[in-house]
Image (tube, rainbow, N blue to C red):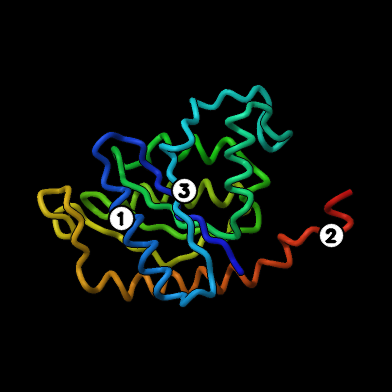
Amino acid sequence: MPRIGIVIGSTRPGRNGEQVARWVHDTATDHASGATTFELIDLADHALPLLDEPVPAAQAPGGHPHTRRWAERIGACDAYIFVTPEYNTAPPSSLTNAIDYLHGEWAYKPVAYVGYGIYGAVMAVQKLRAQAGVLRMADIAPQVALTLTEDFTNYTDFRPRPHHTPQLHALLDELLTWTQALAPLRTPTPEKVA
């Protein structure tokens, strides 16, 4: 059964990401009808400092306990949905920092985006798409763009407009299709293990 990690990208106090991620989780769980496991992964629970590994992740796995715990959590998933706000046209540094900690754990896995912000976090997602490509992630096209002015009351109480649910369903369908299609690349073979 595929495991999809729903990554809450902001660690900011008072963030809206938890509400959005729970909506994604609940909608995804209902939509997949038990055929897929969806897990919330909150960066606030991992307390990753600014990247403190002396060797780049592409060259060697991280040695610090927090890096190993993060690698285990991410490595266990088959695909991801990044729930991200947009700060000054970019994703939060907490999310890009968390992504930079790892390398092989992201490879050959699809990633989708649910963004929220004044303009739906479109520019933040563009930057995440570039980062995903370098890590050999399959960056899928559907995106849910939630705006603070129309999908939140007083910028804080999440009330998604009705058209976002079918958008999220389309995103999930494509994400699951890519998850299955890429499974052979993620399956260990004798050559990959050696």
The quadrant of the picture occupied by the N terminus is bottom right
Q: Is residue 191 above or below residue 184?
A: above
- Mark 2 is surrounded, within 10 Å at the Cα level, by few (under 14), some (14 to 19) or many (20 or more) other residues, namely few
Which amino acid type is marked by label 1?
Val
The residue carrying mark 2 is 189
Q: CA distance from mark 2 to mark 1?
A: 38 Å
Disc nearest the viewer among 3 and 2: 3
Left or right of 125? Residue 13 is: left
Give the residue drawn at x 41%, y 57%: 113
The residue carrying mark 1 is 20
- Mark 1 is surrounded, within 10 Å at the Cα level, by few (under 14), some (14 to 19) or many (20 or more) other residues, namely many
Give the residue drawn at x 69%, y 38%: 58
Q: Is residue 176 above or below residue 116?
A: below
Image coordinates of residue 128 in percent, x first then y, are 46, 48
What is the quadrant of residue 29 in the picture?
Answer: bottom left
What is the quadrant of residue 89 in the picture?
Answer: top left
The residue carrying mark 3 is 41
Sequence-first disc among 1 and 3: 1
Classify mark 2: helix, strand or loop: loop
Classify mark 3: helix, strand or loop: strand
Q: CA distance from mark 3 to mark 2?
A: 28 Å
Left or right of 114? Residue 137 is: right
Sequence-first disc among 3 and 2: 3
Left or right of 7? Residue 156 is: left
Which residue occupies the foreground of this view, 130 or 67?
67
Image coordinates of residue 183 in percent, x first then y, are 68, 67
Which amino acid type is marked by label 2?
Thr
